[in-house]
Each structure stands twice: as structure tokens, then as C-alpha cells.
Amino acid sequence: MDLLEYQGKQLFRKHGVPVPDGQPAKTVEEAVAAADDLGYPCVIKAQVLIGGRGKAGGIKLASDRREAEQHAGAILGMDIRGFKVHQLYVEVASEIEEEYYAAFVFDRSAKKPMAMFSTRGGVDVEEVAETDPEAMRMVHVDPLIGFQEFHARRLTFEAGIAGDLIRPVGALLASLYEAFVTEDALLVEVNPLLVTKSRDVVALDAKVTIDASALYRHPDLQEFRSEEGMDPQERMARERGLTYVALDGNIGILGNGAGLVMSTLDVVAQAGGEPANFLDAGGGSKAEAITQAVEVILSNENVAAVLFNIFGGITRCDEVARGLLEALDEIDSTVPFVVRLDGTNDKEGRALLAEADLPNLHPESTMLGAAKKVVELAG
Ligand code: GDP
Ligand code: MN
């Protein structure tokens, strides 16, 4: 789970990583109120789950209220590389002396966290990593020992920072490691790690990824679960407790059981079609779950035809048929549905579909036959 900058900074603050004062805002009015409260000059920052906001014009300095209003208005609603800005963060402006880079990530091959540090941070850090890899210093941290002063000394000496900065940078790195471990993060990245004109060291940006599998240990982080940047169908599916992954094609897919859905995707691809999604309705799906799944599939405008591939084990095919008919009754769609029901109560299920006699329902008895049919119908 990726966090927005202001959420990441909230965690930083909690673990003692110094960050400038700031307040989130969702409207121009809120942003102006926050700016008045924080004082001028301040920075208005777009909150989106993608980097490079500065270069895209999503970060602007405001020296008075008029500018704060103007920038907030311009940035809200802006599109930053496919991410629409719904939120802002207003922050006290910092005076930049140096821009460093610091991060903790997991090095999976070493099975250890790895600290990264460079004096050449800022908006072009990727380029530095390519042209001058020596400028990025790294050190592994034994998780049983944790991040120690010697780690910090090695990183900062090797990177060659000024003597007066070794302590504050080391302290920031130690707090950052604390945040990384305590919050079950997969990544904490600070770029830039700022040295101000008054030689204070602060995190000016925050990129934090929390291990989603560890979220149950952090009920306080649940509120950060951002809907931003999420595919609208995926959001809808999640609200309904369905396992759904959006894909690029035009054939909606529903099956029960992840394995069956996977092979359905393969067979559809083999028949020359492009699946629009992966949707596993799960074992023992009741009619209502099927209705909800159909709603999710059809909410994707690209879907030209749908394939239902159900193998009844615990799932009863008549329940699936009932759910599908209810959904079609409610949604009143003309999108063609190819339905293959096999297994428990398949006869009853097929009978229900035949009885309904809908023009856009196409029963098929084999998986390959169903795949070919749906590809044909999707055009
Ligand atoms: P990113 O572009 O998405 O990585 O956003 P950052 O938060 O890292 O900001 C990008 C750049 O904007 C920074 O590297 C700074 O150069 C500049 N910037 C951000 N905040 C301030 C600030 O308070 N004062 C000044 N002078 N520059 C800032
Ligand atoms: Mn940045």
C-alpha cells in the first residue's frame, strides 16, 4: 500500500524524522486557510501516488495569500501523468542549501533491509544512479542488530558530507529505520533529504510503501488506504469483497476459483481474445455475490462480451444462474453473456437460463467452445 506524501510525513513525525510543518487540504478554501495558519512563504504540493510532481508543475511556492489561492486552484484537478489531483499538502517553505537522498528498502536477495544514501538527491536522482552509481552509497542492516551508528557513519563518510551534518543526518537515518521497521514498510524514501540554509536536516518529501499483508497489525493505517490512483472497477470490487484485477481487453471474465479463472484467461487469449479483467467469485458463491460481480464487470465500458466459466463443486450452478438472471434483470444490459456451467446442479442451472430465454445469453458446454464464442461476440 502506497502512502501519499502527507501520510508518509505523518508517520515520519511519529517516529522522530524531522519534517516541515504542514497541513493537508481538499479544497482551495482549506488550502488558503492552511497557508494563512502556517504563514508565508509556503509550498502547495499535489498529493498523488506518483513521483515527479515538481517537474509536472504540481509543486508551487506561494509568497502570499493571493498566490496560495491561485496555485491551489491550478494544482487541484491537475492531471499528473495519469493521476488526477484530489488533495493538496500545504507546507512551510524551506530554504534549500543541499538536496540529499535517503532510503530503506528490502534487498530480497540479501534477505536484509538496505540503507541507501547519496548527497546527490533531488529531482534527477534516477539519472545519478545511472551515470554515477558510486554516488549512491548502500549498506545492509542485520535485522537482529538494527540500524547502528556505525552504519550511519559509514554511509555519511563514504558519501562525503560536511562534518557538522554527520550527526543530524545519522539521527534522521536512525529514526527513518525505526519508522521502516515499526510500520512494516517495504520502502521509506526521502528525496530530497534537505539541508536548509540554517543547516537543519529535514525530510522534504516522503515516499512510503506499507506491506499490505501486515496491515492487520496497524489498524491506525487503515484510514490511509487510499482510493486514489485505483482503477474504479477495482475499487468497486474491493468494496464488495471480490477478487478482481483490471486488464486491458474487452472480454469480461468471471469464474469461481483462481485457478479456473487463470486458465479461462489463457483459453480466451488462445482463442484470440483479450480479457478485460480477472474476477474470481470464490467458492460457494451465492446469487447475490454473482449479481455484484456482474455489476462490477459491466461497469467497465470497454467490456463488449462476458464469459462466465463456472465449475460447480461447492458452488452450485443453479445459484450462479439465479444470480446472473437477477443481475441482468436489474442492469438491463445488451452485452452478450456466454455461460458455461458444469458440475454441481449444472442441469438445474442450465434449465433456469433456458427458461429465461434472454437474447443475449449464450450457453456453451465446453470451455474452449465458450472462449471461441465470446471472442466472436466481442468482435
Ligand atoms: P517530487 O517532484 O514529486 O519528488 O516532489 P518533491 O517534494 O521532492 O519536490 C520536488 C522539488 O521541489 C524538490 O526537490 C525541491 O527542489 C522543490 N521544493 C519542494 N519543497 C520546497 C520548498 O519548501 N522550498 C523550495 N525552495 N523548494 C522546494
Ligand atoms: Mn521527491
Image: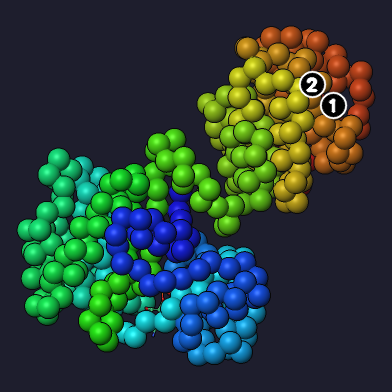
CB of residue at label 1: within 8 Å of ligand 1? no
- CA gap between label 1 and label 2 equals 6 Å
Q: Do the residues labelled 1 and 2 touch (CB within 8 Å)?
A: yes
Residue at 12%, 54% (x, y): give it: 148
Total numbered badges shown on the rendered structure: 2
Residue nearer the viewer, 69 or 355: 69
Query: Residue at left 28%, top 46%?
Result: 181
Q: Height in image: 361 above or below 52?
A: above
Q: How is the image coloured?
A: rainbow
Q: Which sits in the foreground, 251 or 94? A: 94
Residue 214 can be seen, yes or no: yes
Q: In which quarter of the image is ligand 1?
A: bottom left
Q: Which of 17 and 78 is in front in this view?
A: 17
Query: Label 1 belongs to which residue?
Result: 325
Q: In this view, does 275 lie above or below 327?
A: below
Q: Residue at x 42, y 59 (%)?
A: 10
- The quadrant where residue 152 appears: bottom left
- The percent coordinates of residue 20 (x first, y second) are 38, 72
Q: Answer left or right for 361 relative to 116.
A: right
Amino acid type at image mark 2: Ala
Secondary structure type for disc 1: helix
The quarter of the picture where residue 202 lies is bottom left
Q: Could you classify mark 2 by the number of other residues whose Cα lies within 10 Å: few (under 14), some (14-19), or many (20 or more)?
A: many
Residue named by callout 2: 321
281 sits to left or right of 166: right
The secondary element bearing badge 2 is classed as helix
Q: Counting other residues with Cα less than 10 Å from the Cα at mark 1, is it few (<14), some (14-19), or many (20 or more)?
A: many
